[in-house]
Image: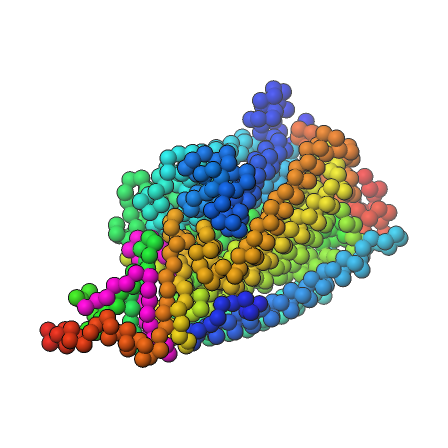
Amino acid sequence: MSEHGNGHAEPTSFLRKYVFSIDHKVIGKQYLFLSLFMALFGGLMAYYMRWQLAWPETAIPGAGWIPEPMAFGGIIPPEFYNALITLHGTIMVFFVGMPLLLGALGNYLVPLMIGADDMAFPRLNMMSFWTITTASLVLMASFFVEGGAASAGWTGYAPLSADPIHTGVGWGLNLWIMALALEFTSFLMGGINFLTTVVTMRVPGMTMFRLPLMVWMQITAAVLFMLSVGPLIAGAILLLLDRTVGTGFFIPERGGDPLLWQHLFWFFGHPEVYVVLLPGLGAIMEILPVFTRRPIFGYKTIVYSTIVAGALSFLVWAHHMFVSGIDPQIVMPFSITTILISVPFAVIIFAFMASLWGGSIRFTTPMLFAIGTIVTFIIGGVTGIFNGSAPVDIFIHDTYFVVAHFHFTLFPDVFLGGFAALYFWFPKMFGKMMNETLGKVHFWWTTITFNMVFIPMFLIGAGGHMRRIYNPLQYDFLKPMQDINIFITWSAVALLVGQLVFIFNFFWSMYRGKKAEDNPWEATTLEWAAAPTPPPHGNFETVPTVYHGPYEYSCPGQETDWQPQHVEKGSVAA
Amino acid sequence: MSDWFPKNISTFGGDIDSVFNLIFWIVGIGFLLGEVFIFYALFRFRRREGKKAEYVNGDLWPHVGWLIIPAAIILVLDLWIDFAGAKAYDRIKGDMPISDVVVKVDGKQFNWIITYPGPDGAFGTEDDLILENELHVPVNKVVKVLLGSKDVIHSFFVPVLRLKQDMLPGREIEAWFEATETGRYEIACAELCGYGHYTMRGFLSVHSEAEYANWLVERWPAPETEADGQQK
């Protein structure tokens, strides 16, 4: 047990050790399991939606169990389809992306990477987890109340969302609002915890510019979230009041303004994209140096670019509202800031590319997923320019072009980046290596089928195919694109089925995998080099002292090609 | 990729399409260069026995240049796209051209309520004509549409016109277009508006001048028009 920080005694009872734990590593794993569990629902919903789009109003195989009135013998009605699109978005962003990248990776890695024995506020940490768990239960319960689940889209535009008469959804939408408010609260607590931990609990020698970039990404994300979520929590409460006690903040007949909701939502919504994005990129930043065996290129430039991008993200929100009816004179300024935000992100991508140059690249599963993330994320990045251009947006807004674009940003980030992170840190977390062959099969299968799903969506989007349409065959101009819809659906089925390889590998390796050494990847950061595998309660046997930056690989004049952060250059590597 | 676009029959549609194409070529070439670089680097710097990686951390100024210079190029390209976009946007959303025809279009779950002011040119008078889901306009004339909503947010989307504008309850938003080809085209709702959202389909009929004049006469036969005129 460690003597530094605010060390707490190791619990002995099962309940205290594995359920109501205050150990950041256990809480990190709890977030991980929660996010993977919710991802199953999000994926299942995607399957139901895709089937409906390919073969509208036919019985969906595997949907027979859904009770009426959600589905009728496996055929889903438009009300339920709208609930699926709403909950798929909500779940994937707030209940998969955030708990996986911030909750699981942040909790598990931040204290280990800075040499701390736990988070600054371990009990608050436990409370954060149980708050999002409650939020998840509230969200899933919303399917089973009278009137069904929320069906106003994950953006919940008022007045569709503000008065039950428009959708027929009653408590389902109220519960959706409450689940979101709880989720926001959970990550506010988490963000405060991360920031405090990083500011106060770094070990001696761990200066801010010696922090692993993952830590920088986590704290930048925490700050962005804190600065942006306040208005939306307020907005969510106003929306709930509109629905339940008859106020009219967003309802014109009662003197309110529907656009107010959109401003509150997107003022949060765009920074939120980066809240999810940054930790995923952070994982890539950790993985690249390890498997190229060279320092990441431009550490400080990456940090400054991230901060610039984060600051700019507060000045772009109206790009979601170009056709919403806001004053056309305010549109172009937002279009310009939006397109300019490509500059700091381009710098980060260039840094990744430069980090490959001159390396000695090992193509392990985590590295393959990291490369896959970069290669596909670039498509997501460049297609953002189309949406950001105000005149082009007039045509492609609310089409599948937008759907394809944001899936090309968030899927590489959350799933490809998330998988990279899981294959990479699994040995530390569970003390076992994952199977490399299965990992590589999983990688090729996932990236290929992912592209088969979302590249055609750019094409039908360019063809004018609207999103959130229950039955595309209603429109003559969409009928010629139906074959592509069917192709997308088969590809999506393949993508989803392929994840069974991961699930099998994950659980099989946990029990039967090869035992992992303390530092199987020969990495330099503290969680690998200084902590045992798996780390004990309190993380480190002795408090490490840090002597240099996090990515000292292939230093000239050194015997090994990695120089752990806590081992002075010139002395013998651990 | 603009081959995938629906046919364009609007005077400003070409501006939108050309900005799209401009962006497509700029980012397309950038994308290809980036990916080729990545795959080349992956191949060239794959692990080989006895070959150590280079120790370059990229924090020295000459190295930072490798990031800053390409970023500066991106900035210039961004501004090019911004200026081209601003020009097109100003043409579409700047000063509205003088309109020949004015029509009111209201969204109402899940129909388009289309109101013609009639010969007196004023809405809310007896000679108004209200149609559901049928919008008739003359070709080569500037049509002003006054967009509103009776309930939730809808979005007036005519793919062939490259026109999309949300319709808000409690507000009237002006939009315009000038169709260049006659025919019958689909109008779609592009903003989720409830369970019947996908059924909210309308039609735009673009008539030749003679045909449109005929259509007007059929709706407002001459005697009634005169009577209206006398009442004034």
Residue at 41 percent across and 53 percent down: it is B198
Q: Position of residue A10 (x, y in %)?
A: 63, 24
Q: Position of residue A239 (x, y in %)?
A: 35, 45
Q: Which residues are magenta?
A: B127-156
Residue A186 visible within the image: no
| Secondary structure character of the magenta stretch overall | strand
Q: Position of residue B60 (x, y in %)?
A: 71, 61
Q: Residue furthest top?
A: A13
Residue at 64 percent across and 67 percent down: it is B30
Where is A522 relative to B18, above or below?
A: above
Q: Is residue A107 left or right of residue A187?
A: right
For the N terminus of chain A, the image quarter is: top right
Residue at 75 percent across and 36 percent down: it is A433
Q: Is residue B130 left or right of residue B187?
A: left
**Does the magenta segment cover residue A61?**
no
Residue at 15 percent across and 76 percent down: it is B223
Q: Quadrant of residue A325?
A: bottom left
Residue A496 visible within the image: yes
Q: Residue furthest left?
A: B231
